[in-house]
Amino acid sequence: MITRQTEKSIETRLVPKEKSVSLGQIFRACKLPYHYLLALLGAVFFGFPARKIEVIAVTGTKGKSSVVELVSALLDEAGHKTAHASTIHFKIGDKKERNLHKMTMPGRFFLQHFLRRAVHAGCTHAVIEMTSEGARQFRHKFMSLDTLIFTNLSPEHIESHGSYEKYVSAKVSIARALNTSWKKNKVLVVNRDDKEAEKFLKVFTGIKKEYGSADAGGPVVTSEGVSFNWEGIRIESKLPGEFSLYNILAAITYAKTAGISIEQIQSGIKKVTGILGRAQKIEVGSFDGAQGKQDFSAIVDYAHTPDSLEKFYQTYAGKFRICVLGNTGGGRDTWKRPVMAGIAEKYCDEIILTNEDPYDENPEQIIREMAAGMKNKQPTLILDRRTAIRVALTKASKGDAVLITGKGTDPFIMGPDGSKEIWDDATIVREELVKILGQQNH
């Protein structure tokens, strides 16, 4: 049922306050009822599956996919049968499918169908990564949320939303959806260390749980993993960096509210030894056909915001860092280009700027705009991403860290006129390592 509150929300969007309205504004406004109707029809068509399964949403700028993986792992450890949907993949029970949609929250009934499949498979919980773009297109509607986990917020998708404030508002709308959900004992889990935390807490009237760095006693954070004291036990994980510490805190805070035991939390976190495309360490050996020894680190990460890139680079402090990076897709968040390159200049010893997702922009122009943000170091510009990765790996010596960011598990490099090249950073790194180590042996 479309409530008066919903009608008022749509009306507010359809009638802009500005006296001058662009064709683009009119077009976007007209699409809003269309997206809402699709969400409603999808729920009706698949029989409102969210009513028959516990739905945990995860939102924020960074860490969403990792928190989804961790929460799902903890629920599995406690004996629940889970489903989850994220940027990385879709999981129902023991079956996983790589997310090839080039979007976190696919539309056109996809998520409702996913939940229906999960219910049919006997899953008791579904963990869903939710984005601002998805929320803006009402893809989170009719999902009957039980829990929302908020990780953090920093500027992203500014050109798409129109402003940072509108981006934040789209995220907060998911907390409002939780608040209006008919489910009982609803829970909001919030990172109290984030400057936007209060906005989420303010719109929710149910059970509120907060987490932050102060909850981690005696933390040890390295490039090999993290450990800390929590609720009288020692949490140990092979996931590296401060970002992993926060992601783990988010997951275990939820797990406690869900009644998962301390022992199950401890063992469940320990079993998550890596997350695809998130600070993913690539190692090859004789089992891959490599004939030489890999004595340096090669790490693939999704980092695509200034804050996430900086924290990722900081994780490998003390190592000689050879960094390969592109930037956000063509036509998106162009302000980040020189900023990201400036961060690379600050932390990296050698920098290779390369192609990422140019779409209809000139990829050479994109990386030159990035290079403009570097004042004291001269980057190497290599448009072909495979070649850039190969060059970085050949430069590495014992103990070095080759850090390849921006794509993570993204399945394609997106080019002009909708063209796309099948891609996977981890696979490319592994292939090039095998070639390089084979050459070194001859």
Image: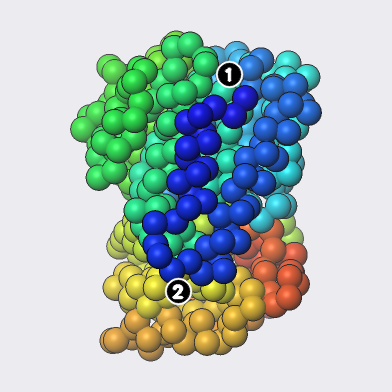
Q: Quote the CA–CA distance across marks 1 and 2.
A: 39 Å
Left or right of residue 128, residue 373 in this image: left
Residue placed at 70% from the left, 77% from the top?
A: 416
Would residue 7 be visible to someone looking at this image?
yes
Q: Quadrant of the N terminus?
A: top right
User: Residue tagged by mark 2?
Assistant: 334
- Locate residue 206, reporting x and y percent: 36, 18
In the foreground, 380 or 204: 204
Look at the image and name its color scheme.
Answer: rainbow
Please name the residue shown 35% across and 39% down the image.
Answer: 246
* Residue tagged 1: 54
The residue shown at (67%, 39%) is: 37
Residue 1 vs 411, above or below: the answer is above
Q: Amino acid at mark 1?
A: Glu
Query: Which image quadrant is residue 107 in?
Result: top right
In this rendering, the count of numbered labels is: 2
Q: Secondary structure at mark 1?
A: strand
Mark 1 vs 2: CB contact within 8 A: no
Q: Position of residue 218 (x, y in %)?
A: 22, 33
Q: Which residue is nearer to you in this view: 45 or 84?
A: 45
In the image: residue 431, left or right of residue 75: right
> What is the three-letter code of the residue carrying label 2?
Thr
Secondary structure of residue under mark 2: loop
Q: Quadrant of residue 369?
A: bottom left
Say which of 417 and 222 sits in front: 417
Q: Is residue 386 above or below residue 6?
A: below
On the image, the x and y values in percent for residue 38 come to: 70, 40
Q: Earlier in the sequence, mark 1 or mark 2?
A: 1
Q: Is residue 267 visible?
A: no
